[in-house]
Each structure stands twice: as C-alpha cells, then as structure tokens.
Image (cartoon, grey):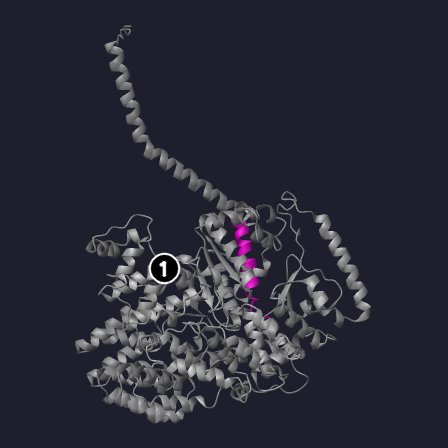
Amino acid sequence: MRLPTVHIDTISFIIGFAAGSVFWWLLGRMRPLARQIRRDMAESNESAQARRTSNVEENHRRNTLRAAQGMHLAAPLFALDEILLAPRLIAPLPIIEPGDPPIIDDIVTQTLPYLPSWPELAAVYSPASIKIEEALLGGRNLVITGQPGLGKTVALAHLASKCAKRDEDLGKLVEKVPFLLHVADLKIPVKEKKYILDPIIDVLAENATLFDAPRLSEFIVYNFQSGRALFLLDGYDELAPEGQRIIVEFLSTLLEVYPKIQIVTTGCPEKLGGLVGLQFAQLALMAWGPPQHNLFLEKWADLWTKFVEVEAWSHDGAQPVDPLLLNSWLDIDDQAMTPFELTLLVWGAYAGDCLGPGILDAINTHLRRLAPKNVPIAALEMLGMQVVLTLEPIFDTRKAREWVRSFEPPEERTEELEAEIEEAGGEKQEGDTRKDKKRKKGKSKKAAPAPGLLPKMASSGLLVSHLNNRMRFSHPVIGAYLAGQALAGYNADDNLTSQPDWSGKLLAIKYLATTRDISDLVNGYLSRSALPLHTHLLVSSRWLRFAPKNAAWRGKIMTQLAKIMQAEGLPLGLRGQAMAAFALSNDPAVGTLFRQLMQTNLYELVQLAALGSGVIKDSKAIPELASIIRTHNLASRRAACLALVSIGTPDALEEVARSLLQGDEDTRRAAAEALASHPAEGHPMLTEGVGMEDVLVRRAAVYGLGRINEPWASELIEKSQVEDDEWIVRTAATDVLEARAQADLRAPKRLPPPSEQPWLIEFASTQGMGISPGSPATDVLLLALKSEHEETRLAALSYLRLTPSEGVLDSIYQAMYSDDLELREACFQVIAELGSGGMKLPDPQKIGLG
C-alpha cells in the first residue's frame, strides 16, 4: 500500500513558519512581563488585604499592649513598663563555621563555664548577653529557659509590648505583629491542619470589637501567611510531659502550615521535650544580681511614693517609713533570689504586712493578701496539692470544684450544684459541628461566675480563668508552695516518685522539704541513673536552699556533688553545675569546702572553687585567691580576679589593683576586665588607668572599659584608638570596638543544608567524597569531627546534633571524654540539649567512658 503524496505549499509554509517564530519570540519576551504582572497583582492583593485589616491590626496591637502591661506580679500596683528591668539572655555558644571571623570573648566567657541551667552565676559575673529581639535576628524559633519566678513571662510581655508599640529598638522586627497567648488559652488538639489557626482566632475573638470580629480571621491568616506574625506562647514550662507533647504537636503543625512565622515560648532548662526536635534554640534568661536588685528597689521606692503611698488604703493611719530605711533593711544578699521573690519581699516591707524577713514569709504573706475573705487556707492548699498529684497545672473548673467541695459553706453547695447542672445543659445545646463554631464570638465561655470558692479565688487574683472552663494558678510558685504545705500532711511520696519529672512536681517538693523530712523521696529520686548529665542530682540540689540545715538527706546530695566537682576529665559544664549547686545551697560549710579545694594542684578544680568563693562572697578566701593570682595558670588567675571583685571588700579590691599594676600582661588584662564589674571602685580605677604612663596598664584598662556598656566608656576607648601613642593600645581599642559590633553574630541562626556549606564541600573533596542535595552527610560530618582543625570539628558538631543516631552519639561521647577541651565542652552542651528533649542517653560507664 502506497502512502499518499503530501503536497506542501511553499508560500503557506513560509508564512506559517514566520508566524510561529514571531509568536514564540513574543511569548518568550512576554514571560518576564507576565511574571512581573503576577507579582504586581500579588503585591496589590497583599496591599489591599493589609489595608482591609489595618484597623484590626491597630486594635489588636492596643489589646496586646494592654494585656502585656498586666502580665507581672505587681500588676495591681504598677504597669509593666513602669517597674520593668529590661530582660536579657545569656549569649549562647556561637555556631562555628570555618572561614567566619572569630567572636572575641572577654574574661568571663573564657573563664566561667557555659551554665544555662544556672543563670544565677551569670548574675554574679556578667558574661556576654543579648536582648531578646537581637536573638530573633538569626531567624530561629526560641525557647526562653529559667527556673520559675525568674521572669520568663515578663520577658515575653516585654517583647510583646515593644512589638505592639513598634519600638524603634526592634530594628528589622519593627513591623512584626505580636500574638501573645498562654497555653491554657488554646483549645487543642486540632483535628485538621486547615483549622490550625482556629484556637488562636477563638482566643482573640473574645476581646475583638463587633466591628473587628468579621475581619479578625482574615487578619490573623494574613499575618501568619506573610510571616509578620510573632507568636509568643507562655506557660509551656508549667506543663506536665503529656501537656507539652500536645503543645509540641500543635506547634509542629503550625510551623508546617505557616513556615515563615517565628515563635518564642518558655521552658524549664532540664525539660524542653519536643521543642528540641523542632529545633527551637534554647536561650537562658539572665538572673538578677546586686546592680539589678538595687535598681529595682529604687524604682519601687519612687513608684510607691508617687502612686501608692498617697492612697488611704495603703496604710492604717501610721506615718510612712522612709524608703531609704526600708531598702537598707531589706536583706537581698541571697544570690539565688529571683525577681518573683524580691518583688514579694519589697511589697511586704513597703505595705507593712510581711509576716517575717524571709522569702517563705514573703510568699505566705502574699497568699494571705490574695486569699478571698472567709476562704480557709486549707482549701487553697488542697487545690494546689491536687494540681500536682493529678499533673494538671491547667485544670477543669468542674473537677476543681470537687477537690474543694468539702470546704464550701453548706448554703453555697446547693447553689453551686444548680450552676453546674445549668452549665452542663448549656454546653450540650452548643453542639459541636464545624459550621456552628465558625467565628461566633462568645461561643466558648470563660469559667462561669457561679457561686463557690473558685470564682472567689479568681476574683481575688489567686486563680486565672481561661476559655473552655479552664483555670490555673496565677503563678506556678504560688501553686507549688500551697502544694508543698498540703503534702506535709499526706503520704503521697509514692505518687510523686512514680510521676515523670515536671516543673510543678519538682517545685512542690522544694517547698515540701521546708516542712518535713523528704529522705525517702530523695533516695528514690537519686536511685534512678541519669548519667552522663546527673540530672536528678542537680535538680534535687535546688531543694537544699530552703531545707533545714540538719535535714538527713542534705549530706547525701552534697557528697555526690563533691564527687562530680572533683572528678578530673569530666566537662567543666557539668562540674560547674555542681559548683553552682554548692554555692546556692545556703549551706555555711560551703565556704570552707571551696577554700580547701583551692589549695589543690588541680587547675580546673581551683578555677571552679575560686569562682564559687566569689559567688558566696567569702572574704575568708582572699588569701587563697591572692595566692592563685601569683602561682597558678591563666584560667585560675582569671577566676581569682573575678572572685575578688565579686567579694568586693577593700582588701579584695586591693589585690586586684596590685595585679593590674604589677602583674604580667595577661594578669593585668584579667584584673582590668574583672574591675569592670565593680562600678563604685573598679570604674574609677579603669578611668585613671587609661591615662597612666605604663603602656601595659593603659592596654589592660582599655579591655576593662570594653566590658562597661556606658557612653563614657565608649568615648574613652575611641579616644585611645585615635590618640594613644602606642600601637599596642590602639590595637586593643580597635579589638574592643569590633567585639562590641558582634551582637548579631551571637544570635542563634539557621544552618543551611550540608550540601550548601562551602567548608564541608571542600572537606568532603579532600576525603574523596561528595554530598548529595538533601543528604544529612553524616559520614562526612563524622570524619570532620575528627579533623585536625578545631573549627572544622566544632562546625561538624553543629550538624551532627541534628541527627543523633546511635553512631553519632557514640562519636560525640568519644569526643566529650577526649583531651580536646573546647570540643569536650561543646559536646557536653549537645548531650545536655538532647537530654532535655527527652532522649534516653546511654550510660558512658557501660561503653567504657566516664
């Protein structure tokens, strides 16, 4: 069969070919224009959406600011901004990348181990720190850690306030829209991803105006999609493990659907749960030291005199006491004192209602201040105990009524029962369909103002009501203190021992230890192996502070702490925690122990003991510290200088001044940087030193001035950089000014994929290997961990922590017990982070280490 002959008209072919060529040429030229048109349309739609929600945004910012200003202990008296001391975070260990400029560390960073679980030592020695907004510049999600009462909620409220006001200090974050919530506000879990914002919308709808309510959902979705949303979630640290798991699932889905947002939440340093797996950067909140204590007293005195003292209710006809006398009477020499505790002490002193001079007296006073009239303290204690025993820091009001029903007056029980029946009937009528729940304001009710004890506690400020009939104590310390008092009369040790660790339980035991012997609890707690982190020992050591000095269990804890502190070869990050536990134990024998340890020839132990002596301000240790400056290695000499300045007596400061004038070059610099921590005597010495004839004194003084964040210090440094005759001094001034510009480098940042890291690609090529896109490159990184270059080893560790398989853990363990001191400390911090995330870590002794 022959195929038909196809005839092609030449002219038609040429015309068709030309037309097609022109068409494709025009299409090719129009593609960039089309893309531009699409971009313009998207921007136009975005701008239109922003205009539609602008009024909603301004109202939301005002509501957020109003709420944030009341999120602190003294809210009944002052707004947050009036009494606030701006919170700061301990600068995290930097992520090392080969080829990047090194971060210049001062004497404290080089001498004090990185102890995020013990920020009280940072309050004494002032290591490098950053603002919360600076920490966000790296693009990471953050979890702010600290013990209860340290000020984590205030830190979130402060950040929310700055965002709400568009504070210029925020820099690149100035247009962020804050969404400030407590975990108790969220009705979760959410069944479908597309409804992941519903819990947030429901909460904000409660305070929205009738005009804003229809546009609220659009406003929230827009800000989460565009990445303008800054989600600030308080209360994660208060939850038991199951509650934390639910929150982590919610945050994981939220980040999956809206990956552009940033989240800041709060955490307990030892119990971060799934936040570690979500790659939240852990940053420790700085504790308060003497400078902050004094500034807070000055602020309180000024505000009390202006606004409270003039009110008739603030005094019963008696003449007000001079604030200077009150502030001098207050004993705030306790280095472990939290802002929560200091606030209650000062409040009780100024109000004249304090039951005693101690911290426990101040807490008890505040409880009586908050307790509703005619409500027995036993009812409050029962509620606190049930919260701990049931692991429900956020509790259902109906269940809580059963807990305290026996304390109800008989005439109120019938009324309360009727209210419960009515409430249950109302809930049944609400229904549970998705259509009915669409943005109807008021659909979820707050705890009903029914008769009974709970509404009275909420009205007094002891409890906080949330959506969906949920409540919580206004502060976890208050609930834990009440629980500790109640547990003294119950045999609940088995219940507590069987519980997983969570902040409410551990805090309740701390206060229980003040009322009765907890030897059985301690023995059971310490019997559980927690190597290599010794978590149970270090956590239980915080119970020593308020416990009786003759408690039988104190000796067991302190003996084990001493073993860890003296164990050569263990990371300083671990041994330093043992030293911190000693220093904050409030035990009179600790000073003697530190002085004995300073007489050994073990350099790391001497370094730690010297730092510990400075924390407790042991003036008897001055001769030993002076001897260390003359005879020991540089790290020990630095520690001795820091400790002497912390002790702060004339004899101690004289020894440091002598070192500044007569020591070798490194000792002079250590002395000058240490003196920067003593404003009264140290600052004048450095000001004088920068103008002395001795070039080494001038150079050291410049480094010391670099640790003083004041305009006058900056002016002296800049003057030395330009006018000093000696290049060695000018170079020192340049180094100091460059170090001050490195705040951005300390912000935790996202790591690019291994396949996009030039240093790792180059290293892989030297090993004859390649890195595929999307691959974790574990084999290459394990080889890099053994590189001869220190910065390569540290850079590899930053990636290996993200894939902690058995083989990776084994390599990190080997490095942690090696002779490479810097890698050892970095590995310990990785292991500590994984442990706080709930990973079961192998016992190093069982694999021939430790």
| Residue 126 among magenta residues | no
* Residue type highlighted by circle 1: Lys
**Residue 430: horizontal and vertical position, in percent?**
70, 48
Considering the image in quadrants, where does the N terminus appear?
A: top left
Above or below for 626 versus 397 = below
Query: Observer-nearest residue: 41 or 826?
Result: 826
**Residue 9: horizontal and vertical position, in percent?**
26, 9
Query: Observer-nearest residue: 108 or 515?
Result: 515
How many dots with numbers?
A: 1
| Residue 56 among magenta residues | yes
Task: Please give the name of the residue rendered at 41% of the width and 89% of the height, measured from the top-left corner.
Answer: 593
Answer left or right for 68 relative to 657.
Answer: right
Answer left or right for 797 relative to 503.
Answer: left
Answer left or right for 271 relative to 137.
Answer: right
Q: What segment carries the magenta color?
A: 54-75
Name the residue that disc number 1 marks: 749
Task: Tell me which secondary structure the magenta stretch mostly adopts.
Answer: helix
